[in-house]
Image (tube, rainbow, N blue to C red):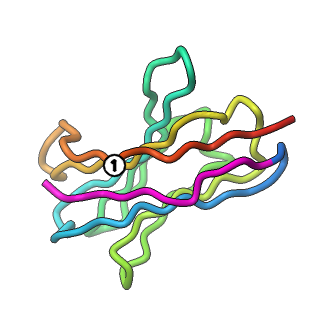
Amino acid sequence: QVQLVESGGGLVQAGDSLRLSCAASGDVSRYTMAWFRQAPGNNREFIGSIQWDNGWLNYRDSVKDRFFIGIELADNTVYLQINKLMPEDTAVYYCAARMSSSDHYDSWGQGTQVTVSS
């Protein structure tokens, strides 16, 4: 397993942009990194993922126009760029990791709260 620490959440206004970061410790070269979110009263939902070694991306259809995932190799960090934030984006955002050969995300960060005011 790897250790994951998210940062970058906060209170923003609708229409703003925000970048969340997830710092990973350990060798993540064979991992797929993902972002999830959980709004109050809702199940945790998948946003998107990126495979560390080849950059292959996968997004949930409903967010692919505003959400972008990337990697900063120098910092061993995966980020989530969110543009044109909407109140319904309010949620706790989680970073997760799995071995690219596995279907199971077994490493999770503590989550970072994003609150979007209208």
Where 12 sits versus 25, above or below? above
Where 91 sits versus 48, above or below? above
Tell me the amino acid under the disc marked 1.
Gly
Image point 72% across, 47% down: which residue?
A: 11
Query: What x and y, as percent, mark residue 62?
Result: 61, 32
Query: What x and y, as percent, mark residue 59?
Result: 49, 43
Left or right of 100 on screen, residue 66: right
Image point 36% across, 66% down: which residue?
A: 23
Query: What x and y, as percent, mark residue 43?
Result: 45, 19
Q: Pointer 1: what residue?
A: 109
Residues rendered magenta in the picture:
1-12
Where 21 sits versus 98, above or below? below
Which of these two is toward me, 61 or 24? 24
Image point 38% across, 49% down: which residue?
A: 95
**Magenta region, main secondary structure:** strand
* Image quarter of residue 14: top right
Image point 72% across, 53% down: which residue?
A: 83
Magenta includes 10? Answer: yes
